[in-house]
Image (cartoon, rainbow, N blue to C red):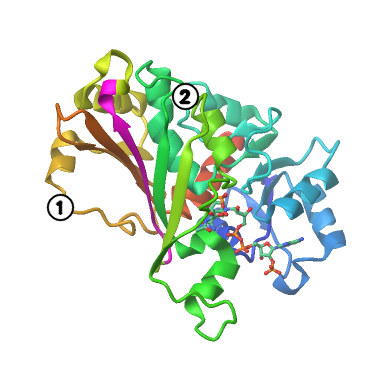
Amino acid sequence: MKPKIFIDGEHGTTGLQIRTRLAGRDDLEVISIPEAERRNKDLREEFLKAADVAILCLPDEASKEAVAILEGNNSTKIIDTATAHRVHPDWAYGFAELDNAQRAKIAKARLVANPGCYPTGAISLIRPLRDAGILPADYPISVNAVSGYTGGGKQMIAQMENPDAPDHIASNHFLYAMPLKHKHVPELQLHGRLDRKPIFSPSVGRFAQGMIVQVPIYTSDLNGNASMADIHAALTAHYNGQNIVQVVSLETSATLPRLDPEELRDTDIMKLYVFGTEGSGQVNLVALLDNLGKGASGAAVQNLDLMLGHG
Ligand SMILES: NC(=O)C1=CN([C@@H]2O[C@H](COP(=O)(O)OP(=O)(O)OC[C@H]3O[C@@H](n4cnc5c(N)ncnc54)[C@H](OP(=O)(O)O)[C@@H]3O)[C@@H](O)[C@H]2O)C=CC1
Ligand SMILES: CC(=O)N[C@@H](CCC(=O)OP(=O)(O)O)C(=O)O
């Protein structure tokens, strides 16, 4: 029997992209609710309970509701793409490259919380340096980022694309979350193994998919005055042996005149860069990804495969 997969929120931005990635797979069966019935709670309950794996692509509250429906049901595994369970101790954090143990943890978990798009970029840069003993736990981390507007889901897509929408956004690029209380901060702090809350400053650009996440660092404040080469070596060692997170060489990074957030659009790859000038005392650590690829739907399918034993 093929495992049954139900994508709750299949007709939203993240759900649709998961559906596309699963189209044509003959090792599993996607069970699906017609779009007009997407908010029919009874039908959703029936599908949630019938699934071997339910992938939740819903706002936080609806996601918690779906998890409550499955309370005590041990036959449906859950991947939640929302923010709701990312710092919950009973949930495995769905970033397979987090450390040596994470892939196996995800593979045997019933509850997997897919990481946020921005945290995927920032944690991929921070965590290996924490684990290697280079980055002190109390380092004052800042994370500055730009995302494509699909990161805000159907609502923001309409705001950006429809000039007649009452809440239309005409800006080509804007900052938001200025009170520094973005929903991603707890996740960044916990999985980045940071003692202090990072300062997270996201922004959105007038492009659909893509993301740049920047973590600037003073190397003189790192343990042992780690050099740019040491930082790059630690990242390279951490991501050795897998093909989704790619550490770009220092030589290539040094030749880049600019970095385009859309470069990895429609891929599930993430590229990491160490920018700067050796000896200057500063580096800018940068992650480049598609917010809907490794930042959401691609990661959900990667986790699904691990949970189905295809890892
Ligand atoms: N977009 C992105 O880049 C990323 C998104 N995520 C996370 O994925 C989740 C989904 O986001 P996204 O796809 O962008 O959002 P969308 O708004 O595009 O899609 C959400 C879908 O859920 C449906 N929905 C909302 N409430 C309910 C409900 N109570 N019952 C059933 N269905 C419901 C919506 O239906 P309706 O059309 O009726 O509103 C819509 O189809 C969020 O939690 C988000 O944080 C994670 C990483 C990146
Ligand atoms: C551009 C934009 O609005 N991005 C969203 C983050 C993406 C999202 O809602 O989902 P995740 O938390 O799962 O990443 C935000 O800042 O709230």
Q: Residue at x 41, y 38 (%)?
A: 142
| Marks 1 and 2, how far apart at CA | 32 Å
Q: Residue at x 24, y 38 (%)?
A: 248
Q: Residue at x 31, y 32 (%)?
A: 217
Residue 195 location (% of width, % of height): 52, 24
Mark 1 lies within 8 Å of ligand 2 (Cβ measured): no
Residue receiving disc 2: 99
Quarter of image, res 279: top left
Report the span colored magenta. Answer: 208-220
Disc 1 element: loop
Q: Is residue 281 left or right of residue 255?
A: right
Instruction: Decide if residue 116 is in sight here.
Output: yes
Disc 2 element: loop
Q: Amino acid at mark 1?
A: Pro
- Answer with the quadrant where ligand 2 appears in the image: bottom right
Q: Amino acid at mark 2?
A: Asp
Residue receiving disc 1: 257
* Residue at the far bottom in the pictured view: 164
Front position in the image: 143 or 24? 143
Front position in the image: 211 or 15? 211
Q: Is residue 307 left or right of residue 39?
A: left
Residue contact at pointers 1 and 2, CB within 8 angstroms: no
Residue 87 location (% of width, % of height): 64, 34
Q: Residue at x 35, y 29 (%)?
A: 239
Residue 199 location (% of width, % of height): 47, 40
* Residue at the far front in the pictured view: 179
Predominant SS of the magenta segment: strand
Q: Which mark is residue 241?
A: none
Q: Is residue 309 left or right of residue 163?
A: right
Instruction: Decide if residue 310 is in sight here.
Output: no
